[in-house]
Amino acid sequence: MKQVVASVEEVVTVLKLLGDKTRLTIMALLDNNDCCVCELVEVFQISQPAISQHLRKLKDAGLVKETRKAQWIFYSMNKEHEMYSLIKDILAHIPDQQEKLEELEKKGTKISCE
Amino acid sequence: MKQVVASVEEVVTVLKLLGDKTRLTIMALLDNNDCCVCELVEVFQISQPAISQHLRKLKDAGLVKETRKAQWIFYSMNKEHEMYSLIKDILAHIPDQQEKLEELEKKGTKISCE
DNA sequence: TTATTATATAAGTTTTTTATTATATAATCA
DNA sequence: TGATTATATAATAAAAAACTTATATAATAA
């Protein structure tokens, strides 16, 4: 992937955003597939507003995009973001988080947006 | 460099530490050469205790090492740290910070530890 | 239209972080 | 030894972050 050099401030902004367990895991999940808010609420043990607020921070920074589909809002990774290569580098250091979504399926936790 | 996969928590710890402008810049400086505290105090516009506290966080996490030489304490990057490859990946995204030290030399700001 | 569901925003609280000032410790120098 | 210099630690204040509950908005379903 193309190696981008940005300002210290820009990199710090990304590190601050990913320097939170919930947000880093959200980014890892979005790296594989789009997720709607209700899925993320199920994955993490925090309130829906807390998830929405994390998503807003990521969106405000341009790291993720949102798309409404009927009553659901799906979030996806913004692969055009200038710092996407940095994000990919970071995500390469953590284990795949996809199992978190698979577990929900197994447990039969019905996610309404499906 | 060998690609290491660690837990989300371990990576979050590193990102939190580097998600601060002062600490990220310190790491960039230490990546090129060891620095003593008085040099760092000159580079950043914050108090000496503030620098010491940033260094302590980095040291407590094992990211840097310290060596006393007479009355000075020199800090250096801990290249044996499990997350060193992550740190290198991150530093590759910011410009070289070496000029910050060179500027001090030019301005004639005498750093006593030399 | 009214009820329900999905999500966002507001307000407030608690926790964490980062800085400052004051003081302690450790080494060197006179 | 006493003064000076380099650095660390303690105490505290201020700012930022992250959560919760309550409420608003937007879409769909009955």
Image (cartoon, coloured by chain):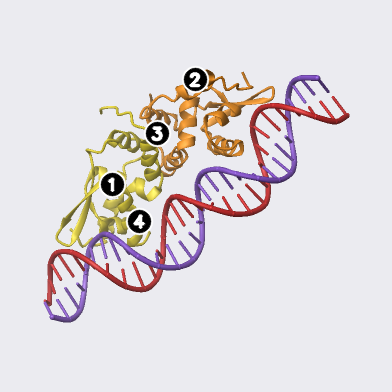
Chain colours: A yellow, B orange, C purple, D red
Residue at which label 1 appears:
A29
Q: Tell me which chain the residue with mark 4 is part of.
A: A
Question: Residue A4 placed where, x, y %?
Answer: 30, 29
Type of the residue with mark 3: Val
Type of the residue with mark 4: Phe
Residues beneath discs 2 and 4 located on the same chain: no
Q: Secondary structure at mark 1?
A: helix
Q: Secondary structure at mark 3?
A: helix
Residues beneath discs 4 and 1 located on the same chain: yes
Task: Report how far apart the C-alphas of labels 3 and 4 lie in the structure.
Answer: 31 Å
Q: Earlier in the sequence, mark 3 or mark 4?
A: 3
Q: Earlier in the sequence, mark 1 or mark 3?
A: 3
Question: Residue B5 placed where, x, y %?
Answer: 38, 35
Closest to the camera, between mark 2 and mark 3, is: 2
Q: Secondary structure at mark 2?
A: helix
Residue at which label 3 appears:
A8
Q: Are marks 1 and 3 in contact (CB under 8 Å)?
A: no
Establish if A39 lies above or below B9: below
Q: Tell me which chain the residue with mark 1 is part of.
A: A
Task: Report how far apart the C-alphas of labels 1 and 3 lie in the structure.
Answer: 26 Å
Image quadrant in which the C terminus of chain A is located: bottom left
Q: Which mark is residue B43?
A: none
Mark 1, Cα crowd under 10 Å, few <14 / some 14-19 / many 20+, is: many
Residue at which label 2 appears:
B102
Establish if A32 lies above or below B81: below
Q: Are marks 2 and 4 in contact (CB under 8 Å)?
A: no
Question: Residue A41 placed where, x, y %?
Answer: 31, 58
Task: Report how far apart the C-alphas of labels 2 and 3 lie in the structure.
Answer: 18 Å
Mark 4, Cα crowd under 10 Å, few <14 / some 14-19 / many 20+, is: some
Question: Do we see residue A31 in this rendering?
Answer: yes
Residue at which label 4 appears:
A44
Closest to the camera, between mark 3 and mark 4, is: 3
